[in-house]
Image (tube, rainbow, N blue to C red):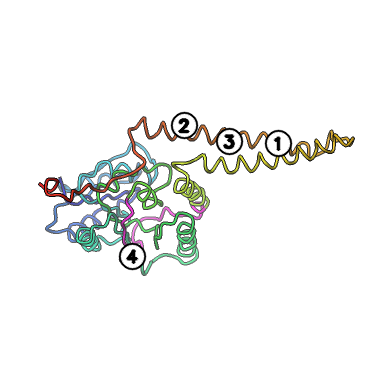
Amino acid sequence: MEKLSVVICVYNEELNIRPLADQIRAALRGMDYEAIFVDDGSTDKTRSEILALDDDRFVLVELMRNYGQSSALQAGIDAARGDYIVLIDGDLQNDPADIPDMLELAETEGWDMVAGVRAHRKDGMVLRKIPSAIANYMIRQLTGTQMKDLGCTLKLFTAEAIKQVHIYGELHRFIPVLAALEGATRFTQVDVNHRPRQFGRSKYNLSRTTRVLSDLTLMWFFKKYMQRPMHFFGQIGFFTLAVGIVINLYLLALKIAGNDIWGKPLLLLGILLLVAGIQFLTTGIIAEFQMRTYFEAQKKTPYRIRRIVGTGEKRKE
């Protein structure tokens, strides 16, 4: 088993493969490592460039089509065999020279994750830096994960921490949040080098903003209610049901007093709130059963044990 696995997701990055491979070799000289290139359905010569490296330490994982960055990262993590796993972009903007210091920090201080922070980011202000700063602030506030730069791909994890994470949809931006949900709460952040893109074209566009907001809502729900969905649906359900009951009791009092309530909008609202409240409560009950099925069917536990250490002489033997 290698000590370090470097996972690089690439899509149409043919001009960046060889320079990146040379930089990885130079940065990790003398170390026991593997570099896993995950080709996410490239339509150029990316795969040919990877195979031309002709190096036993470099591995190509070729996906059958373009699945997106999250799925590509998951494929690379699944294929990784190292004790530590590094995620890095394939566009040369991350610097492999930062990896040895991050690895040393994780080993000496026992971190689950060492995250890179692009201290001097080489991207446009309006289209990249400002939206990123707003997104990072919102993520910190809603998830409680105090990360300065979630958009920086360069991160180092222990295999134990990252192998517990399952990345679906476009949740690659929230890997630290997902890792924290699985118990990997010990993390630190370090400034890393960030360089302007030299070759190829960026895949970033502003349409990501709405997707980030949708994923952020999902992360907030996971963080707060994953193991107790009834607390979420139940609060809404009981409130809605209570308002509906009050409205209908008021209308009943009017009816008893001899007033005509048929056709009043308030009557329709009261009935709708009653039905909605019952539906929310029913949804909460179903979600609770689904979570129990999720944990029990996969033999998962709602906790993660870091280690068990005996304190007596017999336990130490």
Q: Secondary structure at mark 4?
A: loop
Q: Earlier in the sequence, mark 4 or mark 2?
A: 4
Q: Residue at x 71, y 38 (%)?
A: 245
Q: Earlier in the sequence, mark 3 or mark 2?
A: 3
* Disc 3: which residue: 281
Residue kind at label 4, given as amino acid type: His
From the viewer's perspective, is 36 left or right of 290? left
| Callout in the foreground (4, 1) | 1
Residue 180 is situated, as x and y percent measured from the top left of the image, at 36, 51
**Classed neighbour count for the residue bearing mark 4: other residues with Cα under 10 Å, few (<14), some (14–19), many (≥20):** many
Q: Secondary structure at mark 1?
A: helix
| Callout in the foreground (1, 2) | 2
Point out which mark residue 272 bears: 1
Q: Secondary structure at mark 2?
A: helix
Between residues 222 and 71, which one lies in front from this camera angle? 222
Residue 236, by quadrant, is top right
* Disc 4: which residue: 194
Q: Secondary structure at mark 3?
A: helix
